[in-house]
Amino acid sequence: MNRTNYNGTLRMSHIGETVELLGWVSKRRNFGSIVFIDLRDRSGIVQLVVNAENLPEIESIRSEYLINVKGLVRERQDKNPKLQTGDIEIDVTEFKVINKSAQTPMIIADETDALEDTRLKYRYLDLRRPEMQKNLMTRAKITSNMRRTLEDMGFLDIETPMLTKSTPEGAREYLVPSRVHPGDFYALAQSPQIFKQLLMIGGLERYYQIARCFRDEDLRADRQLDFTQVDIEASFLSQDEFMDIVETVASNVMVDVLGEDKPEFPLIDFNDAINIYGSDKPDLRLALHLKDFASVFKDSEFKVFSSTLETGGSLKGLVLTGNHADTFTRRIQDQYTDLVKKHGLNGLVILKYQNNTLAGSAAKFITKSETEAMVKEFDLVEGDMVFIGSGAWETTSMAIGALRLALGKDFDLIDEKAFKYCWVVNFPMFEMNDEDQLVARHHPFTAPREADIPLIDTKPLEVIAQAYDLVLNGFEIAGGSMRIHDQALQAKMFSVIGFTDEQIEARFGFFVDAFKYGTPPHGGIAFGLDRFAMALVHANSIRDVIAFPKNASARCPLTNAPAKGTPKQLEDLHLIIDYPEKN
């Protein structure tokens, strides 16, 4: 096998050169005695021209055969502007079949007809598609660039254990039974959180790691069971100084890898993010903001609105301009209503502004003066659509925020090629979970704002955390915080969220003990590398930037994992499994 050039690198400057190429047959076209072949390797595609009279063996060539060719680079007559090599072609003088291929179960091209499970089952074929190769190569460049930036700023690449002790950090863990310690279990690390803080206590000052993390969660488009973080921690820096470092890391990726301009990083308060965008990870590409309808309907006799306001709730909504009223059929309105119901609302008021009045099923409950106030307040014009939700402030805002994104997508209001960053800051320290228990909104190692420490015992829901999330195009690509470095405060945090002294000692004793020995002030962040790459290549799913992902059912169609253990494996691990009987 000989290769003088990669296929996608050939240009007009190579005309007249004899080259030897390797690659897979992407496409073959017969024109009498002349055969055209698109030859693909990871750098791209180049067109081969073969005279079948001189090389009759070419008739045996099929798609995805791996071949080695030799030929002369010449100018192409019918140039293809869609290919980087579209100005040239190769006049083949010799070729050799390296390996044959069976008929593939899917089309290997950017546009494929295969369902996702087929793509994942034959992932090694799916990875030959130029789009997938471009995604993974871009991801590799992103990782390399982030690594160089951090090392240039004095960060050390240090590995931490994957097999560790079970510690509650917010998500369900994977447990790994120990063979040598019967009945005991390791946990696969959800993140390097505790260890990177111990590295700060150890005096390393600046750490990073391309870390594999594991969480037994329900999957969605931007989540996997096993994923990768660019994990960062530093001592002796203020929150602003640390955020500057993170901005440098992200900016270098944009400039060096994507060739984009240096981005801006506006700061948005958590309450403003919820109030204006209906999300704690706002997509700033969409210039559609939530409106507050409470002042318009403060004296409303419409029971849905009045009862909400009387109980301290909110009336949040949107105004969609652009004369779309005629397109909103009952079916479409029901779809948007179902969407906000999935996010916790009981319903959605949808109104059309036409002929200087409001129309819709709830229009009869709205007075003339309220209509006039709404027109004035929100500058309504003919054809505008008005959407109003009611309920508790955060639930209503988040539901209308989901509606905002749906409208933005459905009416092409989002610039899909743009990159818009922002920081979301000043998160609440605590929140109530579904069981009405107080829990840490980020994780229990997050430091509260110093002025709010006295409130932890008396008004915990008013405490603000020193936490910060970096958001890109509506995706939280990185989340972090300044950490608690005082032993008493860390113990108090555990206690407030319901851990007894015995539980603290059993699960975090080693960690709390370390705080006795001169713990430095420190903070950190973790980039979700998969999610960051997904946003940067404009992929629709995190699975398109991971070489071998799980599907939405948390299975690997390629390997058929997970699978049952053999009797011998279970015996070695001291496990007895009661498999449920199948009907």
Image (spheres, helix red, strand yellow):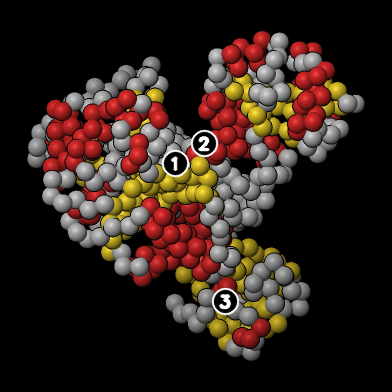
Tell us which disc is closer to us: 1 or 3: 1
- Percent x, y for residue 170? 33, 34
- Percent x, y for residue 574? 13, 31
Whether residue 148 is visible to the viewer of this picture, yes or no, is yes
**In the image, 180: left or right of 319?**
left
Q: Residue furthest right?
A: 355
Tell us which disc is closer to us: 2 or 3: 2
| Tags 1 and 2 touching, CB below 8 Å | yes
**In the image, 574: left or right of 208?**
left
Q: Which image quarter holds the N terminus? A: bottom left
State which quadrant residue 461 falls in.
top left
- Percent x, y for residue 96? 51, 74
Whether residue 571 is visible to the viewer of this picture, yes or no, is no
Within 10 Å of the Cα at label 3, are there few (<14), some (14-19), or many (20+) other Cα atoms?
A: few
Query: Front-most of 31 and 264?
Result: 264
Identify which residue is drawn at 58% across, 65% down. 260
Instruction: Using the numbered discs, state the Cα–Cα distance from disc 1 to disc 2 in whole angstroms.
Output: 8 Å
Disc on res. 9: 3
Secondary element under disc 2, as helix, strand or loop, is helix
Sequence order check: which comes first, mark 1 or mark 2? 2
Q: Which residue is mark 2?
A: 271
Look at label 1 and name its amino acid. Answer: Asn
Q: Which residue is mark 1?
A: 426
